[in-house]
């Protein structure tokens, strides 16, 4: 069997992901957000209303794990949780205007930081990298779990 000519994707992406997450932490701290709170706010961007279960599935989190995060965001006026009129056992979640503004400011600051990281790449490589990464990310959202 021939020797591999490059590292595996996970071997390259996992350390990069960890480094990016660590670089985001001070930005999120400045905005008063935890990583999970930011992930929730980004997950709510997909549509106006979600059930807690649908949101958990969207962000790939255990639905019980996000309850304290939702409690905090609700207390801060960043999301609203209302009983579903069709099933009062289910909460519907949506962003408030303040939640959307905070999410947008945090995302802007994170992406400005990313621009600086990618600035040394030639423009064509930068655009190709981002395009391919978006395509792969979209595939993971639609892919079925193994097993």
Image: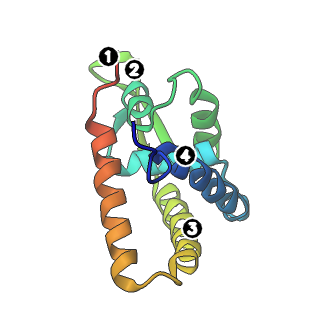
- Could you say which disc has been placed on residue 110 in the image? 3
Mark 4–mark 2 contact, CB under 8 Å?
A: no
- Tell whether label 3 touches label 1 (CB within 8 Å): no
Q: For label 3, count other residues whose C-alpha is less than 10 Å away and answer few (under 14), some (14-19) or many (20+).
A: some
Kindly indicate the quadrant of the structure image that contains residue 142. Answer: top left
Distance between the alpha carbons at the discs numbered 1 and 4: 44 Å
Dot in front, 1 or 4: 4
**Residue 116 shows which numbered tag?**
none
Q: Position of residue 108 (x, y in %)?
A: 51, 71
Q: Is residue 32 shown above or below 14?
A: below
> Which-is-in-front pick, marks 1 and 3?
3
Front tag of 4 and 2: 4
Q: Secondary structure at mark 1?
A: strand
Q: Which mark is residue 87?
A: 1
Residue at the spot 59% in from the left edge and 45% down from the top edge: 37
Q: Earlier in the sequence, mark 4 or mark 2?
A: 4
Q: Nearer the viewer, residue 30 or 86?
A: 30
Q: Position of residue 49 (x, y in %)?
A: 33, 40
In this figure, which residue is indicated by the disc labeled 4?
11
Looking at the picture, does residue 32 appear above or below residue 114? above
Crowding around mark 4 (Cα neighbors within 10 Å: few <14, some 14 to 19, many 20+) is few
Q: Which residue is mark 2?
A: 90
């Amino acid at each position: 069997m021939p020797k591999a000519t490059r590292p595996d994707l996970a071997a390259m992406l996992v350390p990069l992901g960890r480094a990016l997450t660590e670089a985001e932490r001070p930005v999120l701290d400045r905005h008063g957000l935890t990583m999970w709170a930011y992930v929730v706010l980004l997950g709510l961007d997909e549509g106006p209303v979600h059930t807690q279960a649908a949101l958990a599935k969207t962000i790939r989190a255990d639905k019980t794990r996000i309850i304290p995060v939702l409690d905090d965001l609700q207390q801060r006026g960043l999301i609203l949780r209302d009983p579903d009129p069709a099933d009062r056992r289910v909460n519907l979640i949506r962003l408030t205007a303040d939640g959307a503004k905070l999410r947008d400011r945090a995302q802007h600051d994170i992406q400005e930081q990313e621009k600086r990281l990618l600035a040394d790449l030639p423009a064509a490589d930068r655009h190709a990298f981002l395009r391919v990464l978006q395509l792969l990310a979209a595939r993971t959202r639609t892919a079925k779990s193994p097993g």
